[in-house]
């Protein structure tokens, strides 16, 4: 029997009390997800007009992490930070241009052979369609070709629009590329000073905490980039050797494609391997394609079961399911660029959040994040003129 206080209580409180607690908790969680999704959508709308700038800076962060070992070696010869950064970047560009030149020369010499192989394969396909189980006659094939030509004529404007969009994308990529190279130079030369300027804008009470959290986060991104570069190199060398032994054309361009695509975890290696298998089928025969399939599967099994668990666990432990979802979401939002940066962003976010959560009690950090913090404990001293995450011997301002 209810008391007088309960009968005369607040009706709203009584109504809320009648709702099951589990339903209230589920509603709060759902509201948080909706709020986060709305905030993310608003952020994407704000950042979309300046996406080339953001892409360039993000590329510069990854490139800085990749070039820091080389920058450290060059700094032993060139003590001036700007000179060391310039020599590092020039060395990288010389190597990059040399590789592109060799690949371009092989494309020029090998593309004709591949084109002839593709035409021959199409002729064999036409013969199979006429003489095989489908039994299509020449008139039927001609009809399909005419329909294809009609579709092409009817959709010319759409194709031209797509070509213009591709040209705009290339222009945006060029802007991002130039910005990435310039930003990489300054990150290598003055990264610490740039970072301290940003941290100095924060309240003094949180400066040290934010500095430590994002320093650990950048160290995890550095470790991820180096690890992924090793994995990508193993993929490229293994698949490239298989293509070379089979005598396929365009071995060097295919090797470069595999190396670059392997920076997109899981998906990149599969797609680049599929391209190599298709080229093997067109350039040689079905047997060569099956052999190439075996080579691709063997290399990827070696990567996923040996290299990834051993090397990636030393960087930042991310569950494979989380990696796949992150790559899928990043690809859906920003295409190839989103898929490329999904895992580094996840690694950075994980380390930053856990460092902030366990600030003042580092012994409570998870093992993988604790190793990151210990490995990078002295990488960002109170100096300037060092690369992001790299030690400097110059005094602070």
Image (spheres, grey):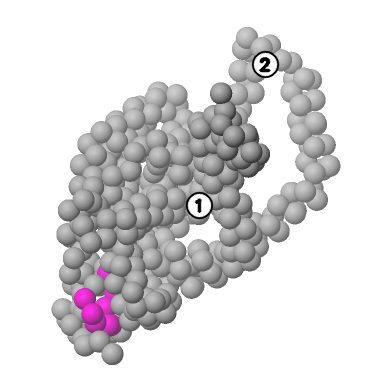
Q: Which residue is drawn at the image coordinates 45% and 27% (left, top)?
A: 285
Residue 125 falls inside the magenta stretch: no
Q: Which residue is drawn at the image coordinates 64% and 38% (left, top)?
A: 8
Left or right: 151 in relation to 51: right
Q: Main secondary structure of the magenta part?
A: loop
Residue 336 seen anywhere in this rendered image of the structure: no
Q: Which residue is mark 1?
A: 338
Q: Which residue is drawn at the image coordinates 51% and 32% (left, top)?
A: 21
Read off the magenta span.
381-389
Residue 382 falls inside the magenta stretch: yes
In the rendered structure, find residue 49 and report the number of the disc placed on it: none
Disc 2 is placed on an element classified as: helix
Q: Which residue is drawn at the image coordinates 54% and 46% (left, top)?
A: 32
Residue 300 seen anywhere in this rendered image of the structure: yes
First in sequence, mark 2 or 1: give its number: 2
The picture places residue 205, in percent across and down from the top left corner, at 33, 74
Q: Which residue occupies the extreme bottom position in the image?
A: 397
> Looking at the picture, does residue 7 appear above or below residue 385?
above
Q: Nearer the viewer, mark 2 or mark 1?
A: 1
> Looking at the picture, does residue 391 appear above or below residue 148?
below
- Characterize the local packing of mark 2: few (<14), some (14-19) or many (20 or more) Cα atoms within 10 angstroms: some
Left or right: 255 in relation to 227: right
Q: Total label count?
A: 2
Q: Nearer the viewer, residue 39 or 175?
A: 39
The picture places residue 103, in percent across and down from the top left corner, at 41, 55
Left or right: 42 in relation to 178: right
In the rendered structure, find residue 130 and report the number of the disc placed on it: 2
Between the C-alphas of marks 2 and 1, the distance is 44 Å
Q: Nearer the viewer, residue 319 or 93?
A: 319
Disc 1 is placed on an element classified as: helix
């Amino acid at each position: 029997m209810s008391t007088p206080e309960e009968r005369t209580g607040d009706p709203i409180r009584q109504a809320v009390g009648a709702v099951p607690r589990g339903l209230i908790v589920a509603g709060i969680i759902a509201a948080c997800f909706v709020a986060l999704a709305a905030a993310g959508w608003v952020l994407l709308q704000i950042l979309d007009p300046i996406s080339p700038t953001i892409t360039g800076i993000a590329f510069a962060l990854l490139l800085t992490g990749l070039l820091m070992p080389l920058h450290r070696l060059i700094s032993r010869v060139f003590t001036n930070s700007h000179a060391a950064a310039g020599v590092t970047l020039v060395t990288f560009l010389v190597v990059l241009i040399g590789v592109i030149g060799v690949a371009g020369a092989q494309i020029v010499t090998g593309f004709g052979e591949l084109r002839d192989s593709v035409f021959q394969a199409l002729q064999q396909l036409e013969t199979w369609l006429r003489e095989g189980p489908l039994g299509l006659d020449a008139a039927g094939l001609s009809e399909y070709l005419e329909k294809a030509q009609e579709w092409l004529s009817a959709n010319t404007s759409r194709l031209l629009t797509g070509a213009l969009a591709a040209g705009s994308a290339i222009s945006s990529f060029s802007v991002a590329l130039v910005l990435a190279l310039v930003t990489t130079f300054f990150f290598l030369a003055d990264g610490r000073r740039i970072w301290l300027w940003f941290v100095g804008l924060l309240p003094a009470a949180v400066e040290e905490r934010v500095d430590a959290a994002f320093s650990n986060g950048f160290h995890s991104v550095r470790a991820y980039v180096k690890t992924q570069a090793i994995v990508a190199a193993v993929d490229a060398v293994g698949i490239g050797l298989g293509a070379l032994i089979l005598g396929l054309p365009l071995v060097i361009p295919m090797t470069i494609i595999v190396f670059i695509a392997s920076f997109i975890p899981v998906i990149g290696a599969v797609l680049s391997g599929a391209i190599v298998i298709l080229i093997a089928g067109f350039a040689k025969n079905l047997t060569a394609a099956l052999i190439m399939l075996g080579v691709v599967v063997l290399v990827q099994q070696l990567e996923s079961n040996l290299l990834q668990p051993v090397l990636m666990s030393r960087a930042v432990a991310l569950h494979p399911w989380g990696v796949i979802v992150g790559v899928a979401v990043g690809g859906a939002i920003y295409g190839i660029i989103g898929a490329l940066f999904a895992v580094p962003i996840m690694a950075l976010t994980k380390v930053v959040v856990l460092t902030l959560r366990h600030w003042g009690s580092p012994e409570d950090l998870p093992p993988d994040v604790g190793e990151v913090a210990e490995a990078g404990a002295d990488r960002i001293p109170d100096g300037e003129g060092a690369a992001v995450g790299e030690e400097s011997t110059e005094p602070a301002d």
